[in-house]
Amino acid sequence: MIRYDSKLANRIMHLVARYYKITDAELKSSTRAPKYSEPRHVAIYCLNKFAGTGYAQTAKIFYMSHCTALYAIKKVQDWIDMPILNGEAVKCVTYVKTTIDNDKTTKD
């Protein structure tokens, strides 16, 4: 199993929750309401792309199947490929990426 940076993963989840104005607990909840599912999908995508979590690891973090994590990543990638579908999600991914990059620059 590939190790991932759990501190970075927690930072990403917190950034996404803050962006969408929900709590970290609401982000990880299993509710299907769009207010929570969209941020959850974005967080799953960001964890996979920026923290190096695999589908199984992400599924464990969010208490879901790895198929659901795979679906979320694909869905957000579709939004990125066609921002007109969900520009807010694309803005959040950009916000998370920029913040993480700034964090790294600050440490160096």
Image (cartoon, grey):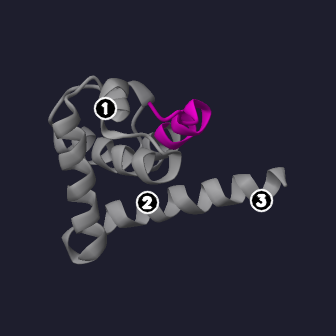
Q: Is residue 66 magenta?
A: no
Identify residue type, mark 3. Answer: Thr
Identify residue type, mark 2. Answer: Val
Mark 1 = which residue?
Answer: 56
Q: CA distance from mark 1 to mark 2?
A: 21 Å
- Secondary structure that dominates the magenta span: helix
Mark 3 = which residue?
Answer: 105
Residue shown at the point (23%, 76%) measured from the top left: 82
Q: Quadrant of the C terminus?
A: bottom right
Residue shown at the point (65%, 59%) measured from the top left: 101
On the image, the x and y values in percent for residue 89 come to 33, 60
Badge 1 crowding class, 10 Å Cα cut-off, few under 14, some 14 to 19, many 20 or more, is some
Image mark for residue 32: none
On the image, the x and y values in percent for residue 34 come to 18, 44
* Residue 26 location, quadrant: top left
Query: Mark 1 or mark 2: which is in front?
Result: 1
Mark 2 = which residue?
Answer: 93
Q: Is residue 15 above or below residue 98?
A: above
Residue extending furthest toward the front: 1
> Tag 3's secondary structure?
helix
Whether residue 80 appears in this view of the structure is yes
Residues drawn in magenta? 1-13
In this rendering, position of residue 55 left or right of residue 103 = left
Q: Is residue 2 magenta?
A: yes
Q: CA distance from mark 1 to mark 3?
A: 30 Å
Badge 3 or badge 2: first in the primary sequence: 2
In this rendering, position of residue 65 left or right of residue 16 = left
Identify residue type, mark 1. Answer: Ala
Q: In this view of the protein, which residue sits in the foreground, 34 or 90?
A: 90
Q: In this view of the protein, which residue sits in the foreground, 16 or 72?
A: 72
Whether residue 20 appears in this view of the structure is no
